[in-house]
Image: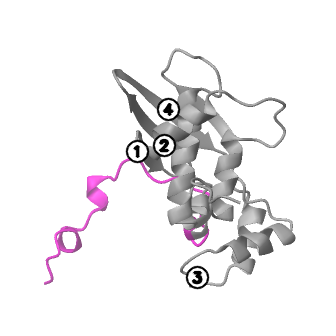
Amino acid sequence: MPDNEFGYTAWGMDWVRLAEPLHTTRPDPLLPRARSIARNNGVHTEIDGTAIRAGIHRGAQASITYLELTPLSPSTITAITTLIPKGTVELDDETHASLRTAGIATAPTVHLTDCSCTARTPRCLHLLATCYAVARQIDENPWLALDLQGYRSSTASRSEPSDTPAARWTPIASLDPATFFGIIP
């Protein structure tokens, strides 16, 4: 079997499945071009929480693709936390297999997509190229697969009370000048 250029880890293959679902009935003619764009570093991604913004330049054309994922549920995050030991540096395929065996789905679920191209379809060339580019990034760093679904950001926020939203403004009267400026009396 030839080596996979995209999705050579189980974590990255979940992202390749977004572009190449198993339930398709015919080949998608956009996939070879999408792989070519991702292979030649034509996709520049910016990740912000569960959202990915990708700039894709092809010749004289440029498109901005936005992809937002559904965050993992708190019960799923708790289940993952119990199966991944604290202090784990790198996620491997065995960890992915153990999560699947436990019935925990780690495959991403797309919540929202948008692209500035003229195709106006939910699966345009640019979205497919973004999926391949992110799969390559996840192959290099599998933690990104969980981080894109809000895993580490939600485990960090679980220690803090999440009932009150963060204050938008800080009243100036609530600041202590000695501690704010680092002055020790």
**Magenta stretch, residue numbers:** 156-185
Residue toward you, 9 or 46:
9
178 relative position to 144: left or right: left
Residue toward you, 49 or 162:
49
Q: Of the residues shown, which amino acid type is indicated by label 1?
A: Asn
Please state the horizontal and vertical placement of residue 144, each as a whole percent of the image: 54, 61
Residue that label 4 marks: 65
- The Cα–Cα distance between marks 4 and 3, rounded to whole angstroms, is 32 Å
* 71 vs 33: above or below: below
Q: Of the residues shown, which amino acid type is indicated by label 3?
A: Thr
Q: Main secondary structure of the magenta part?
A: loop
Residue that label 3 marks: 88
- Residue drawn at the location 48% of the way across and 22% of the way down: 116
Residue that label 1 marks: 41
Q: Which mark is residue 38?
A: 2
- The Cα–Cα distance between marks 2 and 1, rounded to whole angstroms, is 5 Å
Residue 160 lies within the magenta run: yes
Residue 136 lies within the magenta run: no
- The Cα–Cα distance between marks 4 and 2, rounded to whole angstroms, is 13 Å
Q: Of the residues shown, which amino acid type is indicated by label 4?
A: Thr
179 relative position to 80: left or right: left
Q: Of the residues shown, which amino acid type is indicated by label 2?
A: Ala
> In the rendered image, is residue 20 in sight?
yes
Nearest to N terminus: mark 3 or mark 2: 2
Decide: marks 4, 2 in contact (CB < 8 A)? no
